[in-house]
Amino acid sequence: MNCQIAQNLLSSYLDQELTGEQMLEVRSHLSLCNDCSAELEELRAIKHGLASMPSPSPRADLVPRIMVAIGAVEPERPSRRAFGALIATSVAAAVLAFLLFNVFFKPVATKPTADSSPAYDAASDRALTIPELEGHAPLIPVNRFP
Amino acid sequence: MQSEERNRLIATWIKSAGRTKQERLKLFERLTADTHRQAYNMAMRLTSNRTEAEDLVQETFVRAYRFFHRYDENLPFTSWIYRIMTNLHIDAMRKKTRLRTVSMDQSGSDGSQTWDLPDETASTDSEVMESTLEEPLQLGLKAMTSEFRTAVVLADIEGLSYEEIADVMQTSVGTVRSRIHRGRRQLREYLGRNCPGRYEETLK
């Protein structure tokens, strides 16, 4: 690792925001380089100085003042446009789900035979959808026109 | 219960439907009272000025109240407050900078403008100076680019991790990394150039 790369990583090193491998590489460079070590100490002093700055106290009337300002406004509601977009998305999702269901499931249930006629299809559909016929042989011949 | 958890809970209550305006205001007042000190500290570090800091805090909480439906309960409430404040502050600084017609020809890879130091004489008058923090570090913060200052304050004064700062500033961790490093370097150069005696004192 050269000085330029190490120096760009010094703040992240100080904040322990590097991967373990990068931390070791920077540490190894620092053990050999006085300039980078000196820069690290300066950055550390700045970080420490900022962290040690006293917190200023707000005036006692700051919260009442804020609440007076807030009392004069109304909370915004999600816009009609956003609500409209939500409805449109929901409808589109429902339509898509319906279409997908029909494409992937319905043809399996109603797949006609090669020699079927419309009359036959209608009859077999009805036979399939009458619950009491389940488990029985279809009342209508499977192949009316052999 | 930890303060941040409590804040989140109050925030959730305020969002729940069926509350009257008075009830909402009362709950929001609790939330404001609980977090305004942190918000004020942040605002003071960003603006270096009591009056500007109070205005910034007030505007931040007013916005938080107005746009409460956008608050995501997964984010700590203070982080959301910092986000609103940061956006307001950076927007205000950009407007101020445009007014001062400082050259903004160059733009850094992290989306920041790269001029060295703002014209301090344009924003300081005697009244402002009276209520300004005089510490060399605060003067150095004031001289920094607003994006860098915000990242450094969030890291070193508020103690946020890079990931949390990225959430607040709505940017990548890589950009935060760059802003903090360049910000600290700006601060170091400012201190070395403008208050060398006090700079050494600061480094002790």
Image (tube, coloured by chain):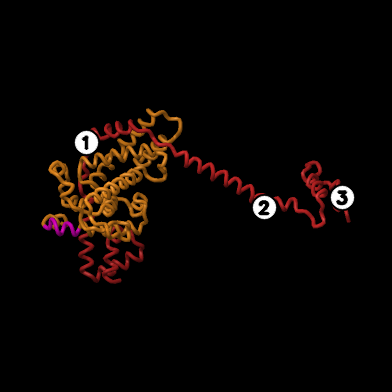
Badges 3 and 2, same chain: yes
By secondary structure, the bulk of the magenta-drawn segment is best described as helix
- Which residue in the structure is indicated by mark 3? A141
Say whether mark 2 and mark 1 are on the same chain: yes
Q: Residue B112 at x, y = what percent?
A: 30, 56
- Start-end of magenta stretch: B188-196
Q: Position of residue B94 (x, y in %)?
A: 27, 50
Which residue is under mark 1?
A59
Q: Do the residues marked 3 and 1 share a common chain?
A: yes
Image marks 1 and 2: residues in contact by CB distance under 8 Å = no
Q: What subunit carries mark 3?
A: A
Q: Which mark is residue A103?
A: 2
Q: Is residue A102 magenta?
A: no
Of label 3 and label 2, which has the lower sequence position?
Answer: 2
Is residue A46 toward the left or the right of residue A99 in the image?
left
Apparent colour of chain B: orange
Taking the image as shown, residue B159 lies to the left or right of residue A130, namely left
Residues tagged 3 and 1 counted as in contact (Cβ below 8 A): no
Please give the chain letter of the residue carrying mark 2: A
Q: What is the display colour for chain A? A: red
Badge 2 amino acid: Val
Instruction: Tell me which residue sits at (27%, 63%) in the image.
Output: A10
The quadrant of the rendering that contains the C terminus of chain A is: bottom right
Secondary structure found at label 1:
loop
Compared with A9, A73 (above or below) is above
